[in-house]
Amino acid sequence: SVTFTVLTMTQLWHSFLSRSQTQSIFVTGLIGNRWLIGAFFLSTTLLVLSIYVPGFNDLIELYPLTGYDWIPVVVSMIVHTAVMELIK
């Protein structure tokens, strides 16, 4: 479940980082595209539901994450942001 969550959240976050190939996310901002924001929150909500809702997480073979399990998710998103910003 941790690996699935890391990969999914990193890809969802990457959509914000990909809005411009040359400008930093700190220049383009996060709120310029309402559809992207909606898709991000909808996808994140579905991910969280698939992890924590009994029956649904059994269907896709995930287990509920602890607070410590979310640390690699956040770290991967921070590292991914740093790498993408350095590349730009």
Image (cartoon, helix red, strand yellow):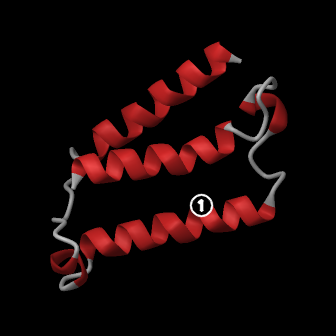
Tell me the crowding category of disc 1: few under 14, some 14 to 19, or many 20 or more residues within 10 angstroms, Cα based. Answer: some
Q: Position of residue 28 (x, y in %)?
A: 83, 36
Please name the residue shown 35% across and 75% down the image. Answer: 49
Q: As drawn, which residue projects farthest toward the bottom?
A: 55
Q: Is residue 8 toward the left or the right of residue 36 in the image? A: left
Quadrant of the frame with the N terminus:
bottom left
Q: Position of residue 45 (x, y in %)?
A: 47, 70
Work out whether 53 lies above or below 27. below
Examine the image and state in which quarter residue 85 appears: top right
Examine the image and state in which quarter residue 37 appears: bottom right
Q: Is residue 24 toward the left or the right of residue 41 in the image? A: right
Q: Position of residue 60 (x, y in %)?
A: 22, 73
Work out whether 39 lies above or below 56. above
Q: From where the camera sits, is residue 67 visible?
A: no
Count of labels in the image: 1
Nearer-the-camera pick, 60 or 63: 60
Which three-letter amino acid code belongs to the residue tagged 1?
A: Phe
Residue under pointer 1: 40
Q: Is residue 46 toward the left or the right of residue 21 in the image? A: left
Please name the residue shown 39% across and 33% down the image. Answer: 76
Q: Position of residue 18 (x, y in %)?
A: 69, 38
Please name the residue shown 71% across and 18% down the image. Answer: 88
Which type of secondary structure does the marked residue at label 1 adopt? helix
